[in-house]
Image (cartoon, rainbow, N blue to C red):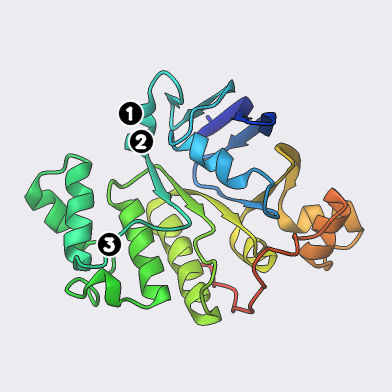
Amino acid sequence: MAIISTVGLARTFSTPKGPVAAVRGIDLTVSPGEIVGLPGPNGAAKTTTLRMLTTLLSPTGGAATVAGCDLVRDPAGVRRESGYVAQSGGVDPNLTVREELVTQGRLYRLLRTEAVARAAELGLADLLDRKAGALSGGQRGRLDIAMGLTNRPAVLFLDEPTTGLDPGSRADLWKLARRVHTEHGTTVVLTTHYLDEADALTDRLVIVDRGVVVTDGTPRDLKRRHTGSPDATLQDTFLAITGHGIAPDAPALPTATAPTTA
């Protein structure tokens, strides 16, 4: 049984110049325990798709379920079973890490004692008493992911979680995502501009371009299918699939060491 299923999921925005179809019909199936990447350039509809799947944006067409909960008829159920780490994060720099995690737990209706215990379980023991505003970029990324895991979600959505981080911090977050997946069986859906990240971290890639899914498969299969060589770069593969590479305004691709599978 799929943990995420979408059929014709669409979103059209109204603008002064007329309607703009940002997502034009996404058909997607994700199995429990997969790490699925949605790589691509700006404007490919990656974030809009995630915002719909996490109930932050209402679809204007199609249907979807997340962890058995209907996106439109049971948005509270979707939120209960999901964790979401947005591009910008959302922590208060004046609160400690512990206070942020406890507050997040309380928002998920945990008892205070449960929320305090959960905060201590999320792998941030070295940061709990530090102010969120004093964290480095990599530490902030760890906190953002911990916030997304407070409710022990079945599905964790990560929207470009490593943008702007140095290579060491990126590698640390890759390892954390792998550990969450390995230890808890959490399904992870990841958007990224970084094709090396998508190649190293994901079980399967879903290439979304101009609001539709154009192909999907394992990184190795996509390379072989679209370039003729499993040793091709994912950048060359993406170019062969879509006719263009990562957009010029996308972030530069720093080098990071691929995570080891636990």
Residue at image coords 79%, 53%: 222
> Could you tell me residue 258's position as x and y percent?
60, 74
Identify residue type, mark 3.
Leu
> Could you tell me residue 107's position as x and y percent?
21, 43
Per the model, the C-alpha gap separating discs 3 and 2 is 19 Å
Q: Which residue is mark 2?
A: 79
- Rendered view: 146 above or below 114: below
> Could you tell me residue 8's position as x and y percent?
66, 24
Seen from this angle, which residue lies furthest front? 16
- Rendered view: 229 above or below 12: below
Which mark is in front, 3 or 2? Answer: 2
Identify residue type, mark 2.
Arg
* Residue situated in front as seen by the camera: 178 or 80: 80
Disc 3 + disc 2, Cβ < 8 Å: no
Q: Which residue is mark 3?
A: 122
First reached walking from the N terminus: tag 3 or tag 1: 1
